[in-house]
Image (tube, rainbow, N blue to C red):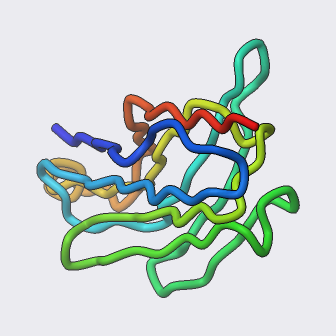
């Protein structure tokens, strides 16, 4: 079993900062790309940022220059530093990771599966 658990959401005024964390646990063999998505009320889930296992990062245009994604491979964790928050950043933020489990390797496959966290609410008020 694999779990992704997010933390760090909350309420903040526009211009403020938050740091989201996500930790993976379970029978993990290796973790490939990790990332963050968000879903505002009544809207689809959108890509925010991603980081590969060797540290390459990708961002949605809407957050470039304001958000920074990072990871700690030893802790199996990914982080999202959010600065200069805007009202339009209000959403539930979901952690995402492509994880290869030990069970999968034992079965003879090296194909990772995609996992999601339960989400953490970020609310930005003006």
| Front residue of this view, candidates 20 and 59 | 20
The C terminus appears in which quarter of the rendering?
Answer: top right
x, y percent for residue 105? 21, 58
State the residue lying farthest toward the right: 61
The N terminus appears in which quarter of the rendering?
Answer: top left
Residue 54 vs 113, above or below: the answer is below
The residue located at (45%, 78%) in the rendering is 53
Residue 89 left/right relative to 114: right
Count the marks: how many? 0
The residue located at (53%, 75%) in the rendering is 52
| Front residue of this view, candidates 87 and 28 | 87
x, y percent for residue 14? 71, 48
State the residue lying farthest toward the top: 42
Residue 86 left/right relative to 98: right
| Front residue of this view, candidates 110 and 31 | 31
Residue 95 left/right relative to 13: left
The residue located at (71%, 57%) in the rendering is 15
Residue 100 vs 71, above or below: the answer is above
x, y percent for residue 22? 34, 53
x, y percent for residue 41? 71, 16
The residue located at (37%, 48%) in the rendering is 8
Residue 46 vs 44, above or below: the answer is below
């Amino acid at each position: 079993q694999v779990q992704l658990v997010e933390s760090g959401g909350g309420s903040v005024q526009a211009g403020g900062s938050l740091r989201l964390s996500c930790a993976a646990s379970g029978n993990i063999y290796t973790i490939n790309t990790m990332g963050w998505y968000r879903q505002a009320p009544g809207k689809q889930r959108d890509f925010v940022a991603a980081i590969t296992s060797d540290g390459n990062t990708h961002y949605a245009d809407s957050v470039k220059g304001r958000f920074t994604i990072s990871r700690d491979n030893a802790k199996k964790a990914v982080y999202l530093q959010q600065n200069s928050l805007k009202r339009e950043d209000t959403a539930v933020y979901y952690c995402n990771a492509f994880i290869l489990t030990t069970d999968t390797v034992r079965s003879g496959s090296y194909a990772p599966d995609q996992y999601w966290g339960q989400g953490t609410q970020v609310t930005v008020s003006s």
